Image (cartoon, helix red, strand yellow):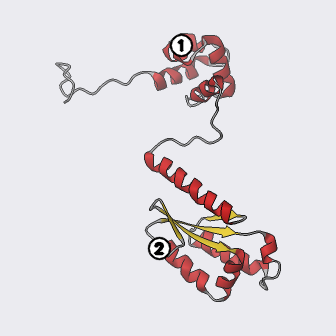
Amino acid sequence: MGDYLVDRTLLVERKTLADLVSSIKDGRLFSQGHRLACSAFRVTLILEGTGKDLAHCGMRREAIQGALVDLTLFLGIPLLRSRDPVETVQLMLFAGRQGRQVASGAPRRPGHRPRRKSRIQSRVLQGLPGVGPQRAQRLLETFGSLEAIMHADTQELASVRGVGQATAEAIRWAVKEAPLPYCNSNRGIPPL
């Protein structure tokens, strides 16, 4: 059904641009596309090559675009591009790593991961409601550490320039410990 199965979850169909043109001409692309779309796996099409590879293909650009519209929009097959086989392998490795991260339930946060402690602290604070880069910086300047911010009460948080009462309450709500559920609230006995 596809060329590669990554982590037993992602089915990859790899096509060079020359192969794409050939498979459009002989009708093979659309039957492959339908089989991929009906697969039980997540699927993607990696299109490999550069515009130079299409220079003498003998097919109009509109025909190629029409085929790609059919695959991506109407069959729902995501399209990834690569320049060469090395980049194709890198894409499959990236996809496998990200697929494992998503499957683990770990939250995805866009952007690069900071290395310096101050940037890590700022990034953690920006995960709190109403806290952006400027508020995170002001909170760190005022309290000196994440620990102090997490232990600060609503009034202390609200006293930081630009934070305010509503944001302070939202921060406290996010960091305060949730009560443990008890099976017998009269006795305070935790569940087994």
Which residue carries the number 2 mark?
A: 38
> Which residue is more in the foreground, 159 or 33?
33
Residue 5 percent location from the top left of the image: 49, 66
Dot 1: element? helix
Residue 151 in the image: above or below residue 40? above
Picture quarter with the C terminus = top left
Q: Are marks 2 and 1 in contact (CB under 8 Å)?
A: no
Residue plotted at (48% across, 26% down): 174
Residue 49 in the image: above or below residue 91? below
Which residue carries the number 1 mark?
A: 148
What amino acid type is highlighted by mark number 2? Cys
Give the crowd class for mark 2: few <14, some 14-19, many >=20 residues within 10 Å: few
Residue plotted at (53% across, 13% down): 148
Q: Residue furthest front?
A: 86
Q: Quadrant of residue 25?
A: bottom right
Q: CA distance from mark 2 to mark 1?
A: 53 Å
Residue 151 percent location from the top left of the image: 49, 14
What amino acid type is highlighted by mark number 1? Ala
Dot 2: element? loop
Q: Is residue 189 left or right of residue 19?
A: left
Count all numbered tags in the image, as a single digit.
2
> Which residue is more in the foreground, 58 or 186?
58
Residue 88 percent location from the top left of the image: 64, 63
Residue 162 percent location from the top left of the image: 67, 19
N-term mark: 2 or 1: 2
Residue plotted at (55% across, 83% down): 31
**Residue 165, labelled with which disc?**
none
Residue 158 in the image: above or below residue 101? above
